[in-house]
Structures are given as structure tokens and as C-alpha cells.
Image (spheres, rainbow, N blue to C red):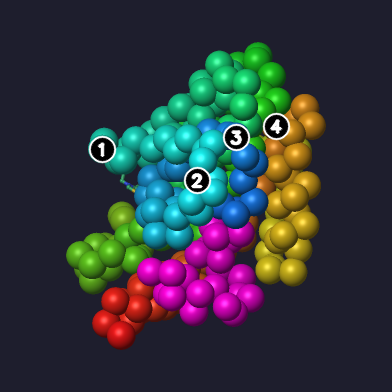
Amino acid sequence: MARAYQTHFSAVDFNETNVIKELLESLPERCNLHLANSMSVRYANLVGLSETQKGIHVYVNRGTSGIDGCTSTAVGHALTSEVPNILITGDLAFFYDRNAFWHNYALTNLRIVVINNQGGVIFNLIDGPGNIPEQEEFFITNQKLSAHHLANEFGFDYVKIEEAKRLKTALKDFLKFDGKIKIMEVCSDQKSAKQSFDTFKKHIKLSYES
Ligand SMILES: Cc1ncc(C[n+]2csc(CCOP(=O)(O)OP(=O)(O)O)c2C)c(N)n1
């Protein structure tokens, strides 16, 4: 696995797996990490945290697998905990649960990373739904919303990431806990997400075979 990791991440590409890797490496020493369904938790599971990252508590409703309530859970936890709370979510899970922000409490210790590939990319990446004619409309559910509007509406800080060059410095800034809820929207697309995930799986498979 370590070899797969090295091979896969030696290229400085901009794709969902690379973003997750950079983000997990940048997490503060003590924090709560919330992972939405579905690719957020799958990516994080494959990329993993390092042995030295001992103060990070990971939360995910993987047993029930709903996209409903992933944001609400992170919001509730942020309201009741002292440490930073970081949520990684896809666009459908994020917009589906937007009422999580409709209250009057300040969320100074919450950071949200929205991987926006304009649909539920999970259904492009797994066998089964990937091969049927209704895939686009009923499984992937293509959509065009931007988290920028939501951030404006609620008065949150917002940063948009579209290339690898800005990612590291943007993450440093984003993860400073300086009193305001922040949203980082990572612009992705179905095609590159599929490519990077397939390549990552290939590298993992090869590392076990050789
Ligand atoms: C309440 C609910 N409705 C539908 C689903 C089925 N479902 C599982 S993952 C998913 C797509 C999630 O899309 P997104 O949040 O953009 O994440 P991505 O797949 O891109 O990682 C859907 C609709 C679900 N898990 N829960």
C-alpha cells in the first residue's frame, strides 16, 4: 500500500485523490474529521492518516450510508466541541443538507471542503449503476450548483480551488481557525474523478501483485 501511495502521488496532478491526500496531510493535530457518503469516506479510507496523526477523530455514518445529515452532524458536533471540525463532502450530500446552516449559532470551528464534480460520482465509479442507460439522470443526478452562492447567502468565507498550484497554500489558510466558518469548493468533474480513482486502484492492485 505504501508503494501504491508513492507511485500514485508522485505526479502533481489536480484530481480528487490528490486533493484528499493533501487535505488529510494538512489536518491540525487535534480535530474531528467528518466524512460524507460516498466518495469522501472511500477516498479517505484508501489514502489514510499517518501513524503520527493520533489526535484526529474520524466520524462517518457509513453503516446507514445516507447522504442526508452528513453536514448536520458536522455542524452539531462543531457546536458542542472545542476542537476544529472538518467536513469533507461531495456536492449532492452538501446541497441536500443545506438546512444544516439555517440557525443562529456561530460556527467558528467548522471547515467544509466540497468536492464538486456536479453529481454523485460514486455511481460512475462502481460497477452496476455504471452500466445502465438511466445512469446519468437517476443515479449520477447531474447538477450545476456552486457552493459560492450558499456561502454568500449565509455569510461564510469561501475559496474556490481549480488547480494544484494553489492547493497547498490555500489549505494552510483555510485550516487556520480564526473565527469564521469557511467553505473550500474543489472544482472537479466526473471524467477526471473516474480517471484518478481507476489509476489509484490500479496502483494499489499492482503493489499487492509485485
Ligand atoms: C438520503 C439518501 N438518498 C440517496 C442516497 C444514495 N446515494 C448514495 S451516494 C449518493 C451520491 C452522493 O453524491 P455526492 O455527495 O456528490 O458525492 P460523490 O458521490 O460525488 O462522492 C447518493 C445519491 C443516499 N445514500 N442517501
Q: Quadrant of the C terminus?
A: bottom left
Earlier along the polypeptide chain: callout 2 or callout 3? Answer: 3
Q: Earlier in the sequence, mark 4 or mark 3?
A: 3
Please name the amino acid that badge 3 sits on.
Arg
Q: Nearer the viewer, mark 4 or mark 3?
A: 3
- Labels 4 and 3 touching (C-beta < 8 A): no
Q: Is mark 2 within 8 Å of ligand 1?
A: yes
Instruction: Determine the secondary structure under disc 2.
Output: strand
Front in this rendered view, residue 92 or 9 = 9
Amino acid tagged 1: Gly
Q: Which label sits on residue 55? A: none
Residue under pointer 2: 89
Whether residue 147 is situated above or below residue 191 in the rendered picture: above
Q: Earlier in the sequence, mark 1 or mark 4?
A: 1
Q: Position of residue 30 (x, y in %)?
A: 60, 34
Q: Nearer the viewer, mark 1 or mark 3?
A: 3
Which residue: 65% across, 14% down?
104
Q: Which residues are magenta?
A: 1-22
| Numbered tag placed on residue 181 in the rendering | 4
Q: Residues within 10 Å of mark 3 (few under 14, many from 20)?
A: some
Q: Residue at x 68, y 68 (%)?
A: 164
Q: Which mark is residue 30?
A: 3
Instruction: Identify the image quadrant of the N terminus.
Output: bottom left
Nearer the observer: mark 2 or 3; the answer is 3
Tell me which residue sits at (39%, 53%) in the image: 45
| Earlier-in-chain disc, 1 versus 3 | 3
Q: Nearer the viewer, mark 2 or mark 1?
A: 1
